Image (cartoon, grey):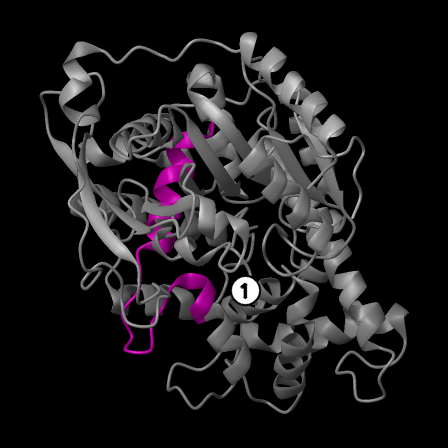
Amino acid sequence: MAPVRSGCGVPAGVLAMVAVAILVTGCAEEQGAQTAPPAPVPAELSRFYTQVPQWGSCTGYAAPGEGLPPAAQCARIEVPIDYADPAGPTAQLALSRLPASGDRIGSLLLNPGGPGMSGLSTVAIGGGTPLAERFDRVGFDPRGVGASTPAVTCLTPPEADAERAEPPEPNTPEGIAADEAENREYADLCMARTGEELLAHIGTREVVQDMDVIRAVLGDPKLTYLGYSYGTRLGTAYAEEFPGNVRAMVLDGAIDPTQDPVAESLRQAAGFQRAFDAYAADCVKSADCPLGTDPAQAIPRFRALVDPLWETPAATTDPRGLSYNDAITGVQQTLYSADFWPVLTVGLTELGQGRGDTLLQLADLYNGRRDDGSYSNLTDAFNAIRCVDDPRVTDRAVAGRQDTEYRAAAPFLDDGRGTGAAPLELCATWPVPNTSQPHEISVQGLPETVVVSTTGDPATPYQAGVDLAEQLGAALITHEGDSHTVVLNGGATCVDDAVISYLTDLKSPPEGLRC
C-alpha cells in the first residue's frame, strides 16, 4: 500500500482573577527554575546564528495562488547542508513573516506538516486573534522544500503525470518485480537530479538544527512553536535536542516517536477506515448518496465505483482522465476532515456517471499539481524526507504481512487483489542511509508543552497524541471530532482559547480539557 502523508497541511476554512493570575505566575516561575539552560552555540556555527534577515517582498517565493497574504514579508537565510561540515556547501531557507500588530512578545514559528509541505503560507494562521497582536507569525520552507534552495527534484511534470496515470501492478511475482524496478528508477532520478549531499541531509535531524538557527536570527532567546502533524515530529525532535531553548510549544495531530513505519501505517489504515465509516454513515441518510442507503453495502458500493478504474480511467475535461491511483488519492484527501465530505459525495456521484473531474482535482491538490501543469516538489520532498527519517523495510515477509494487515485494517481500500506478498517499498533501495530511529522521548528540563489530539483524526490517530503527551510530560487537549488537526482551523473555540492563552501567557490548559 502506498504511504500516506501524516499531514496534509492545515485544512482551509481557515483571562482571570488576580488571585488565580498570581498562582499561575508563581507556577510558571517555579517551572522555569527547573528548565534546562539554553544550548551554547558552537563557534563554527556562529556565522549562521548571527545572520540578519533582509525582509522584503515575497514576489518569487511562492507560485500564484499558493496562499501568501499580501502583507507578508519574505527573506532567505543560510544554513550548512551538513552541520558536521559547516565550512562546506550551504542551503538557503525561505522564510515568511507577518509582524505583530500590538505589544510584541516575540516570534511564533509555524509548520503545517507533510513532510515536504511549504510552510510560507502558515503566516495567515491566527489572524484576528491575540496571536496576531503579540507575535510575529513566521513560516518557513524546510531545507529542500518549496522556495528553499537547493530543492529536492526527482520527476519532471510530464513524468509525474505519467506515473500517476499508470495502472497499479498486481502483487504477482511479475507485478512485484515491476514495482520494485520503478522504485529503483525513481530513486536513481532523485539522486541524479538532487545530488547525494542534499538527499543525505534532508531529514528531521537537520531541520531541527535549522529551526534553532531560525530562532536565533529572529532575535528570540527561546522558541515559541506551533506544529501540525509532521510538524509535531519536528517539535518533538527540537524539544529533545534543545530543551533549554523552548519557551512554548503546541503540537497538534501528533506522531508517536516510538512507532516504526509499519506500525504507523497500520494505525493510519485503521484511522482512515474509521473516517470512511463515519462518512458513509452520514452519506447513506440521503436518498441520493452514491453509496446507497444501506450502511452495510457502503464498501461494496464504493469498490464497484473505483475498481473499474484499474482497467479504464474515467473521463475528465482534462485530457489525462482519472486513474485508479488518483481516485483513491482524491478520496483520501476528503477524509482528512468532515468538512470535505460533501465534496466526496460530489466526486463519487460523478464517478457513478462515468466522470472523474472532482476526484482528479482533489488528487492534483494532494500531489501539488498546479493549474498550469507544473508541480510543487511536495511529493519528491516527502519521499526523500521519509526515506532518511525512518528505518527501511527490507524483509519481504514483513512487507507481505504489512500489506495483508493493511487491507484488513482498511477494507474500503482493499482492491481484492492481495496475495500475501508485496513489493518492497521505495525506501528499501534509497541511495542514502536513514538518519533517525523510532525511540521513546525522555527530555530533562523542558518547560510545559501542549499536545492537541482529535478523537477521529484519520492520519495521526488520537492515541498517538496521548502517547506523545505522556512522553513529553505535556498537557493534553482532547478534541472530539472528525478532522486531521484543529488548532485555529475554526473547528473548536475552546481548543483555540486554551492554546492562545498558553502561547501568550504561558497559562496551562485545564487538566483533562476536552472540547
> Three-letter amino acid code at disc 1?
Val
Q: Residue at x 48, y 69 (%)?
A: 363
Q: Is residue 288 left or right of residue 338?
A: right
- Decide which of 492, 293 is in the foreground and name it: 492
Residue 482 sits above or below residue 50 on the image:
below
Q: Residue furthest front?
A: 18
Mark 1 surroundings within 10 Å by alpha-carbon count, few (fewer than 14), some (14 through 19), many (20 or more)? few
Q: Residue at x 29, y 35 (%)?
A: 218
Provide residue 128's location: percent of width, then percent of height: 52, 60
Q: What stretch is highlighted in magenta?
A: 364-391
Residue 332: quadrant of the picture: bottom right
Residue 332 visible to the viewer: yes
Residue 480 sits above or below residue 355 on the image:
above
Residue for badge 1: 14
Residue 421: quadrant of the picture: top right
Provide residue 483's location: percent of width, then percent of height: 67, 56
- Decide which of 321, 94 is in the foreground and name it: 94
Q: In this view, does 427 lie to the left or right of 145?
A: right
Give yes or no for residue 275 being in the magenta stretch.
Answer: no
Provide residue 269's location: percent of width, then percent of height: 67, 48
Residue 263 visible to the viewer: no
Element type at marker 1? loop
Q: Residue at x 47, y 76 (%)?
A: 361
Provide residue 80's location: percent of width, then percent of height: 18, 28
Q: How many marks?
A: 1
